[in-house]
Image: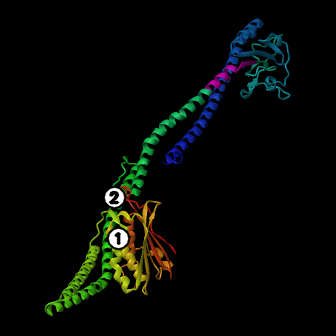
Amino acid sequence: MRNIANSLVFRFFCLLLLVSAIVFIALTTVIIRANTQHVMQEIILSAKRTNGLLVRSMRQSMLLNRLEDIVQTINILGSEPGVEGIRIYDKKGSVVFSTSTQEIGQKVDLKDAQCIVCHSSEKPLEFIPEAVRPRIYASPDGYRVLGVLKSVRNEPACAAPGCHPSPSKQKILGVLDTQFSLAQVDRNILTSRNLMILYSIGAIPVIELFAGFFIMRMVQTRLVKLAEGPREVKKGNLDFSIQVEGNDEIADLARSFNSMVASLKRAEAENRELSCKMVHVAKMASMGKLAATVAHEINNPLGGILTYVRLTSRKINAGSMTQEERKEALGYLEAAISEIKRCGNIVKDLLHFSRSSESAMEKVDIHNIIYKSLSITNHHFEINEISTVTKLEAKDPNFIGNANQIVQVLIALFMNAVEAMPRGGALTVATQDVFGPDALRISVADNGRGIPQEIRPSIFEPFFTTKTDGRSTGLGLSVVYGIMLQHRGQTEVESEPGRGTTFILTLPREIKTEEEKRPIFEGPVVSDL
């Protein structure tokens, strides 16, 4: 089974998870920052409004110079939750009013944060810019504090002898400095940030769950069906079709695959029919090669029969025969009968070989097939002065196969060996057990001319031949390879020019199921001796 880490869907899911995490982290960070900035802007705006409201609420008391009302107003507002302190400075930097009585009368350094805003130059500013009115600093206890400045401007109503000069001479009477604690605000911001992070973390698996369901439903399941098709075709099941619904690219690919398999099935049927025709043509070619020698093979026993019959006829025509002459005549007749049977066996083997092969597989004995093939081609060996050696060492000669097709394979190899040894030689046929896969190995070796290196890769191609006299169809070895392929066997060739050629056929003993239509061995192997 495929490792899940190598799955395309798993990689896509991991990529989607990574992208979702990055997007959510970036989006959450941006939202938290924007929310924090918005909250602080609202807090500062509220602080400025509070300062403005405080100045307006103390205006009448200031006009009437009711200092106790101003103190009471400051103390009431200063006791509200979140208010850290309230101070009013005069133009010289002295604390005139404060929620802390210890600070009243103290003079602050003009370079402090609350004073440097206006006193950064020799001439103080007459108006505090909006951008510098708020300031944030850390309290001694570690929490943040927001300070907001508000100038107390001189008005014509305030100008009076013994009180304040006219606004044209003094525009600023003092500064209201209000401090607000940001401890609770920071806690609320932290809580909100944590909740947003938690929601984002929770949203990622939820989205991935739905995305994973979609991927499994729309991609993974359909890809598994799509991948099953090539595996079935590899097993040789050309009746398999991929059932994928929809009109997307995967469905189009499934339909294209089904169309390709249907075309492949038709091509295989045509190829099977063509292979049968090629086998038949090769067999007829072998029959043509055998025809010339069969006449001679039969002529010899026929001559002997004629001689024995004539001798017997003379004995009978000579008159009464003695017991010894009768016995001699019977010997002639027995010899004639033997020669007639020999002719019958030759014709029977030839007729059996010439019949069309059926594809039925049955239990056969390779040793009997070898002897039968040698008997059919024996006269070729005799007239070409070729000796035959058999080394049948397989302990179990039985296997599942088509006997007539294996005879055709061996005869094709024997005839090739005869043509490779025009001046005579030796042909060795051997068998042995192979225990890697449970198989049977047959080797056909000659000591003839050998096969040149440059043509070895082509010897199993249909119609390939080195003969230019028209005596060969070039189908012999291609049919050998085709028949071995049908038996799921392997064909090996070892050859060296001048030293001979050895064909090694390895056949599995048993073809287990119809599903295993592919060969247990790969294509032909061609090598040097």
- Please provide percent x and percent y for residue 272: 32, 66
Dot 2 lies on which element?
helix
State whether residue 45 is above or below residue 404: above
> Residue 266 in magenta?
no
Furthest toward the front, the residue is 323
* N-term-proximal mark, 1 vs 2: 2
How crowded pointer 2 is (Cα within 10 Å; few <14, some 14-19, many 20+) is rated as some
Dot 1 lies on which element?
helix
Furthest toward the bottom, the residue is 318
Q: How many labels does the image show?
A: 2
State whether residue 173 is above or below residue 272: above
Q: Quadrant of residue 358?
A: bottom left
Residue 22 in sight: yes
Front position among marks 1 and 2:
1
Mark 1 vs mark 2, CA separation in Å: 38 Å
Q: What stretch is highlighted in magenta?
A: 177-193
- Please provide percent x and percent y for residue 490: 43, 66
To which residue does mark 1 refer? 369
Between 254 and 397, the residue placed more toward the observer is 397
State whether residue 146 is above or below residue 479: above
To which residue does mark 2 refer? 262
Q: In which quarter of the image is residue 149?
A: top right
How crowded pointer 1 is (Cα within 10 Å; few <14, some 14-19, many 20+) is rated as some
Between 61 and 234, the residue placed more toward the observer is 234
